[in-house]
Amino acid sequence: MRVNSILALSAVILCSASLASAQEVTLRAVSSFNEGSQISVPFERFIEKVNKDGKGVIQINYIGGPRAMPPFEVGNAVRSKVVDIANVAAAFYTNLMPEADAIKLINKPVAEQRKNGTWDLLSDIHRQKLNSHYLARLFVSVPYHIYLNKKIDKLDFSGLKVRVTPVYRDFVQNLGGTPITTPPGEVYTALERGVVDGYGWPILGIFDLGWEKVTKFRMDPGFYSVDVGLLVNQDTWKGLNDAQRKVLTEAAAWLEALDATENAELVKAERERQAKAGVQTIDLGPAVSQEFLKKANALAWDAVIARSPEFGKKLRALNGE
């Protein structure tokens, strides 16, 4: 009788453990960009797919964008598990992971990054320094630009105050400009009041923020590559079961595939839209454009290597021009 009781109790325990492991888990998510904006929409599509495919397994509770959490706090929020998953530009967490500043210099398709060792290296660094799982990267080969309200006729920012993130700081300073750091939500007012003469931003997204109303010029060519990634807190990732991780991984692969096919058309449409809105192009000619790109890349790699000699050199060896 006692043996039967023990067997029955063991069966209950095993059943309970099985049910617990099969329970649906809900992750808390934020974006470092406004909800519904061009740079948040892919993440929101990812969330929709996870919530559809992961019913009964895993769900994502989307808390929101900068109104829920300031962009420069998102990296630390993932690291410390204030949130479980985030859509965040690498520029917003270089204070915690200096090597993140190299991601903008990696223009190879994500599939190639996964083959040549870049992805494994970046994943290791994210685990070590940001306590995070590097799930996906979006907007590869979508360029950044410098937008100005004063026309220039040479590669010289002397006398110009330019709003920056770590993406552009060294470059703007090298060209004689004064870099000013502000959250995206303060840029419109800074432009309107003349606190800044311009800003760095991707080709995408200025209409989401209304900046086209206070922007006169866009410098061409575009440079670097947008470096938005999906990060999952490493403790959260470890705590998921295989089925839950599979839903996230497959949704991330689906999103990266869409990203690779849609970016060129998005960039083309945005250039046309800016032109119609009256944003004029500053083109200093092919020779200066080449100098511009060469200088931007050299300065950025030098800065990455100065801040992180070991990892910086490895990343440049894999991806430097």
Image: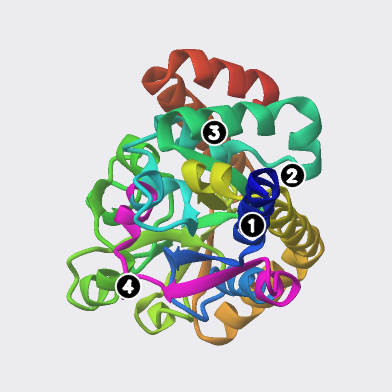
Q: Residues within 10 Å of mark 3 (few under 14, many from 20)?
A: some
On the rendered structure, is 186 left or right of 10? Answer: left
The amino acid at mark 4 is Ala
On the rendered structure, is 190 left or right of 64? Answer: left
The amino acid at mark 2 is Val
- Range of the magenta residues? 49-76
The amino acid at mark 1 is Val
Q: Position of residue 156 (x, y in %)?
A: 36, 44
| Figure quadrant of residue 58 | bottom right
Label 4 – label 2 distance at C-alpha = 30 Å
2 or 1: mark nearer the eye: 1
Confirm whether residue 288 shows in the render. no
Q: Earlier in the sequence, mark 1 or mark 4?
A: 1
SS at circle 4: loop
Confirm whether residue 196 shows in the render. yes
Q: Which residue is mark 1?
A: 12
3 or 1: mark nearer the eye: 1
Q: Which residue is mark 4?
A: 68
